[in-house]
Image (cartoon, rainbow, N blue to C red):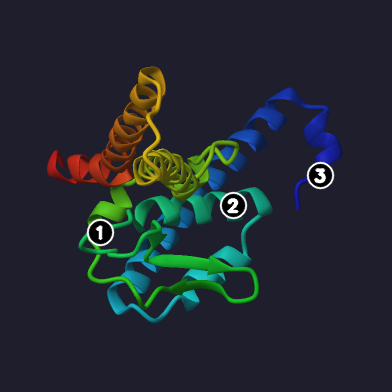
Amino acid sequence: MTDLHITANDNGKLIAFIGETVKSYQSVAISLHQSAAMALFHACQYRDDCAALNALYNGLRINDQTALKRWIATLTLAPANTEANPGNEPATLVGFKKDKGFFVRKGLKSVDVFTLDELLAVEPFYNKDVAKASALDLFKLLEALAKVAKTTDKRATDNDITLPDNVRDLLKNISKVTDEAKLAAANDDERAKARSNVANG
């Protein structure tokens, strides 16, 4: 075992020690990403087995656990009212519950699932900024905002209320902007980047 007291007082030994530590850290980081990619691929491929994902999750630090959940939510997100998810709420193919861990949702139809090579090409989960809102949270917020605008417009019509022009314009703009934002969020994700990386070798 390295004598830490001697190493700490010898700059050359200290730098060498740190160099070896960083190499080990980088090697473990690569293995963590590969493990996450393979575990997610397995869960999506077989649709009922998240044991590997849960084993990985349970071995991570809290920040990395949050990052892994965000990473999976982004990659398996199915927007509402689509062929994959005909429901009114956005959902993820792979969900998470505190008492259960990761699980595969049975209600979703076929989702555009990654190949293993594409998952390996995705930005690693541990690079996720956990301070940012998750993709699922963003979709829910945008859809809630759009729903309020549509509901307000419908109630005004049903009750024969004439809304001021600026309010009507605002409602139209909310629907337009939220639809554009949802489309942009769906397209500007790891899927497109990963497939581009795989295609470009």
Quarter holding residue 89 = bottom left
Q: Amino acid at mark 3?
A: Asp
x then y, percent, for residue 8: 81, 31
Q: Which mark is residue 3?
A: 3
Mark 3 vs 2: CB contact within 8 A: no
Q: Residues within 10 Å of mark 2 (few under 14, many from 20)?
A: some
x then y, percent, for residue 135: 44, 45
Q: Amino acid at mark 2?
A: Thr
Distance between the alpha carbons at the discs numbered 1 and 3: 47 Å
Distance between the alpha carbons at the discs numbered 3 and 2: 35 Å
- Mark 1 residue element: loop
Disc 2 designates what residue? 66
x then y, percent, for residue 88: 36, 60
Mark 1 vs 2: CB contact within 8 A: no
- Mark 2 residue element: helix
- Mark 3 residue element: loop
With 27 as the anchor, is 43 left or right in this view?
A: left
Q: Residues within 10 Å of mark 1 (few under 14, many from 20)?
A: many
Q: Residue at x 33, y 26 (%)?
A: 173
N-term-proximal mark, 3 vs 2? 3
x then y, percent, for residue 194: 26, 45
Residue 28 in view in this figure:
no
N-term-proximal mark, 1 vs 3? 3
Q: Which mark is residue 114?
A: 1
* Front residue of this view, candidates 187 and 122: 187
Residue 96 in view in this figure:
yes
Q: Residue furthest front?
A: 160
Quarter holding residue 72 = bottom left
